[in-house]
Amino acid sequence: MIEEKEINKFTEKSPSGGFRGLLTTENLSIGYSKKGKVDVVQSELNLQLRAGELVCLIGPNGSGKSTLLRTLTGLQKPLLGKTLIDGKEISRLKQSEKALLIALVLTERVDIENATVYNLVSLGRHPHSNWWGNITEEEDAFIHEAIKLVHMDHKMHQNINELSDGERQRAMIAKALAQDTPIIMLDEPTAHLDLPNRVEIMLLLHRLAHKTGKAILLSTHELDLALQAADRIWLMSADKKVECGVPEDLVFNGSFNRAFESKSYFFNAANGNFSMNYPMTKKVWVSGDKTRMYWTLRALARAGYMVVYDAEVQILVTEDGWTLNEKIISTVEELLLEIDCLFHNSDTNR
């Protein structure tokens, strides 16, 4: 895999402090030019991708995530500006040279008849050796190490068409590792996976970035996982802006709310999730156990109750239930029924 001296080269300090960018963009504008008409998706981007970090590229649909990935990898020409990898302009490099710098994992499902995990991962070595015959001991060592890093040793000789979606994605990541580039880019790597596998893949990529010193950039719609796993986030918005930073800083400064602003939902900075904007017309006051508070507030919002200090209907959240008007309640369903009865009786008596 990438040697320690190479990792050190990419992670040395810059004159201004911090780690030097392995990939940088200079006044980059991305989009499409067709029949003399130019459609600018994002403009004046000055981005930096650093070695040893997992960066998540997120943003609303139409903000240009896939376009940016294609441009950074040299699959699409920029409208203006340039992308540099270790000082080399990507648009001026041959395809064979790009393959030594960037490994790309796409969303499309790969099917190779009768190919094993080992066969698939071995394709990652082609840019280095151009072999078409027997694999040398050195190549074999690279392949085995890549498969080991994604914990697929026990599936090494299994046909890829017999793998689960999660296992197949791990095999594709192993292929990118075997390519031994300083940069790995992935387009929606968790798109077709269930929740446990989405979490596993994100944790795996975070660990690999830190362990191998590679820069890993992925686009994703998994905002909650990106907030937890990413060392840095590139947050794209529809108004041709990309905000970069540590996830928590982008939460604190309101960037997430601005990027995903909607009448239907809002970004809840208290828990890192998106919450629905329910029509809430009735008022209650809630206090008590913090562990159960979040789920209590979710249920109340869904039922149309807003929390207001010192409202007439007061709910005490306890460690094992709720207290409403001195009545002990053990389930959320019962709580909602009791509150509904209180409001119904109140309306009837008016």
Image: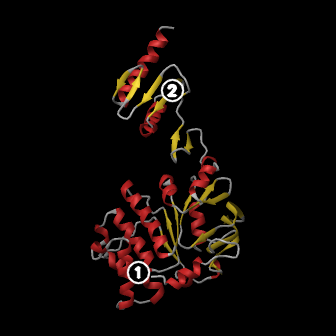
Check disc 2 and report the residue beneath it: 285
Disc 2 packing (10 Å; few <14; some 14–19; many ≥20): some
Q: Identify the residue at image location x=43%, y=60%.
A: 190
Q: Amino acid at mark 1?
A: Leu
Q: Which mark is residue 123?
A: 1
Determine whether the residue tagged by mark 2 lies in a helix, strand or loop.
Answer: strand
At label 2, the amino acid type is: Trp
Compared across the picture, whether 347 is left or right of 158 comes to right
For the point 72% across and 65% down, the residue is 36
Q: Dividing the image into 4 quarters, which one contains the N terminus?
A: bottom left
The image shows residue 170 at horizontal and vertical percentages of 38, 68
- Image coordinates of residue 222 in percent, x first then y, are 48, 54
Q: Position of residue 24 (x, y in %)?
A: 65, 72
Q: Which residue ends up furthest to the top in the rendered image?
A: 349
> Which disc, if any, is residue 269?
none
Identified at 36% across, 56% down, the residue is: 196
Is residue 98 visible from the viewing direction of this image?
no
**Residue 247, above or below 317:** below
Query: Which SS class for mark 1?
Result: helix
- Using the image as rendered, state which of residue 12 and residue 154 is in the foreground: 12
Q: Where residue 191 sits in the image (x, y, percent)?
A: 44, 58
Of badges 2 and 1, the one in the foreground is 2
Q: Is residue 99 above or below residue 236?
A: below
Q: Is residue 262 above or below residue 177?
A: above
